[in-house]
Image: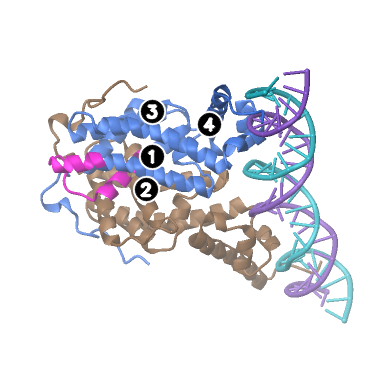
Chain colours: A blue, B brown, C purple, D cyan
Amino acid sequence: MAYRRSPLMEERLASNRERILAAARRLVAAGGYREAQIAAVAAEAGMSTGMIYRYFRSKAELFIEVLEAAVGHEIELLNAIAEGSGTARQRLYAAVECFTRRALTGPGLAYAFIAEPAEPEVDTARIRVRQRLGDVFKTILRQGIEAGEFPPQDLDASAACIVGAYTEALVGPIAPRAERVKDRDRLTQAICEFCVRAVSAGGAASAASTPAPAPARTRRVR
Amino acid sequence: MAYRRSPLMEERLASNRERILAAARRLVAAGGYREAQIAAVAAEAGMSTGMIYRYFRSKAELFIEVLEAAVGHEIELLNAIAEGSGTARQRLYAAVECFTRRALTGPGLAYAFIAEPAEPEVDTARIRVRQRLGDVFKTILRQGIEAGEFPPQDLDASAACIVGAYTEALVGPIAPRAERVKDRDRLTQAICEFCVRAVSAGGAASAASTPAPAPARTRRVR
DNA sequence: TCAAGAAATGAATTGAGCTTCACGTATTGC
DNA sequence: GCAATACGTGAAGCTCAATTCATTTCTTGA
């Protein structure tokens, strides 16, 4: 025999893998999943298309990894906040703020990963990832409820609603071509307050705290 | 000359168009946009693929029309509620309930149209449609704020958050293959309550109503 | 420096659908 | 019934990207 991977080579291979991931991330941030074709990723990484397939089984696999890494990072940040100090309310506020602020500031990753179409496998991964985001909020909510800061509520539903709320509120602003939001701080604040209010005890608490199931319905709906 | 559309023919053409739209709707409901290829729509409608193009310029155009019709219908229902009687709070609750209940009950249209990937043009249409959904809530919110039922808030942000919240909370449950939610009523109620609380005055109002911008942040975030 | 084997290349292949189009069938007015 | 025109058909054509693979270039160990 005459060839055996040297540590140096091993390193180069690893770095190639990283270069591919980084290139893919950049392209998604710049132009969304749709514009991140394998050929483009290869070009961006300065290598041939065939090369990509030496490191990733398929396009979907590559992008799932990019997605999970990116969101994984966000989740770490959120977890640090969730496990940090302060009241549940403060931590919830801070967590939502952290995410929205970064989404508004950073590259278009947020839109691409949270809202943009992709193939089924990637889409499935996206749902998983969103659930993981929701888990962070579930943690905060659970603690808040235990501490009596928040009223009892359906954790899964509330967590999903929080993720959905800030996501949707961001999609417009961070969607490609959307005019840059004039006042990021204002938007961030509005979103955070919405979320915090949403899990806190209602103002007009007492009597009508839980409105009758279907009060204002005009007519039976077909 | 020797041919001129008779009223009868006119009617047949219109009915063909309807058949195409209906077939497309059924397919989307059953298998999502992805499975609703032109060939499949044609088969479902019992006609040839070429026929489709006699009635619609492109696949995107067809599906945009399906989308707008479907959501247009939902919006009518919501508007009826928004303009109906009751407090803003009651109407908000009823509106969210109407949408979520229908989404959970009805065919998979909601998922397909609100969350599923499609081509760029259709996606653009989806964003427009979501904004129209948001507009309904803006109306209710505006009235509620004027009436002193809700505290002042960023209407656009709150409306987007509401749409996002219930949408996200539904995506899991109505996503293809998701196990049917055990208790629809419970989920619906949780979502509605979340949304109503979110726009109502916070419980621990007074002092810390607006938490300091970034209270619990652990460390400067990269 | 060389042979063995691995890594890299990128042009060619493949596949999935949308869209077209040349041809057949219907409908209309006379 | 016939000419004129429109409607309907569905196989073929096209486009766009992902994926493959025969070939070339590089690494390694002796």
Q: Are marks 2 and 1 in contact (CB under 8 Å)?
A: yes
Asked if residue A167 is among those painted magenta in the image, a careful observer would answer yes
Prevailing SS of the magenta stretch: helix
Task: Give residue A70's position: percent from left, percent from top.
Answer: 44, 33
Give B169 or B55, whichever is nearer the viewer: B169
Q: Is residue A123 above or below residue C24?
A: above
- Amino acid at dot 2: Glu
User: Considering only order in the chain, which callout, 4 or 1, is on the residue closer to the N terminus?
Assistant: 4
Q: Please name the residue that numbered disc 3 is placed on.
A: A102
Q: Is residue B190 above or below residue A182?
A: below
Q: Secondary structure at mark 1?
A: helix
Q: Are marks 2 and 4 in contact (CB under 8 Å)?
A: no
State the CA–CA distance, disc 3 to disc 1: 12 Å
State the CA–CA distance, disc 2 to disc 4: 28 Å
Task: Give residue B84's position: percent from left, percent from top.
Answer: 29, 56
Q: Please name the residue that numbered disc 4 is placed on.
A: A21
State the CA–CA distance, disc 4 to disc 3: 20 Å
Task: Give residue C30's position: percent from left, percent from top.
Answer: 83, 74
Q: Is residue D29 above or below residue A210?
A: above
